[in-house]
Amino acid sequence: MGVAEALTEFHTPEQLGADVVLYVTETCGYCRMAESLLRRRGIAFVAVDVTDLPEARSWLIEKTGRRTVPQIFVKAASIGGFTELAAMDRSGALATALAG
């Protein structure tokens, strides 16, 4: 898997096996910001476009309790959205989570 891989079929983070999985939509600015942050850090991720995947949106709501995107999973654990990702990056918690 390269630095970024984009999918248009729904898969859970566990099924994908990637350290970082983003659930995004086509028109989400925060989604692009999250992708950009990860690219700048050289962190490989998989982005799953859930724009036209209602089953994925339902799963995300059930799993995270949130209706917004991006929904970001690190090592299959939900961390929240872009704000939480950026905070983890600033504090060093993202690097620590990926190293463990």
Image: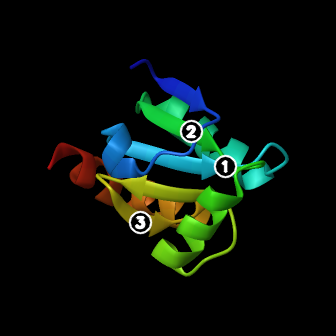
Q: Which mark is residue 36?
A: none
* Residue lying at 54% horizontally and 66% vertically, measured from the top left: 59
Helix, strand or loop at mark 1:
strand
* Residue lying at 38% horizontally and 20% vertically, measured from the top left: 1
Query: Local crowd at mark 1 within 10 Å, few (<14), some, or many (≥20)?
Result: many
Its colouring scheme is rainbow
Q: Is residue 80 left or right of residue 88?
A: right
Amino acid residing under circle 2: Ala
Q: Where residue 91 appears, x then y in whole percent?
A: 37, 62
Q: Where residue 78 appears, x then y in whole percent?
A: 41, 66
Amino acid residing under circle 3: Ser
Query: Looking at the picture, does residue 19 appear above or below residue 94?
Result: above
Residue located farthest toward the front when viewing the structure as drawn:
55
Give the mark, 2 or 1, whose residue is nearer the N terminus: 1
Cβ atoms under marks 3 and 2 closer than 8 Å: no
Helix, strand or loop at mark 2:
strand
Q: Which residue is mark 3?
A: 78
Question: Residue 15: which quarter of the image?
Answer: top left
Q: Which residue is mark 2?
A: 47
Query: Local crowd at mark 2 within 10 Å, few (<14), some, or many (≥20)?
Result: many
Q: Is residue 32 left or right of residue 46?
A: right
* Residue lying at 71% horizontally and 42% vertically, measured from the top left: 32
* Residue lying at 85% horizontally and 47% vertically, measured from the top left: 27
Residue located farthest toward the bottom when viewing the structure as drawn:
65
Query: Looking at the picture, does residue 90 appear above or below residue 5?
Result: below
Q: Where residue 10 appears, x then y in whole percent?
A: 55, 45
Cβ atoms under marks 2 and 1 closer than 8 Å: yes
Query: Local crowd at mark 3 within 10 Å, few (<14), some, or many (≥20)?
Result: some
Of the pair 92 and 51, the residue shown nearer to us:
51
Give the mark, 3 or 2, whose residue is nearer the N terminus: 2
Q: Which mark is residue 24?
A: 1
Q: Where residue 49 appears, x then y in whole percent?
A: 67, 42
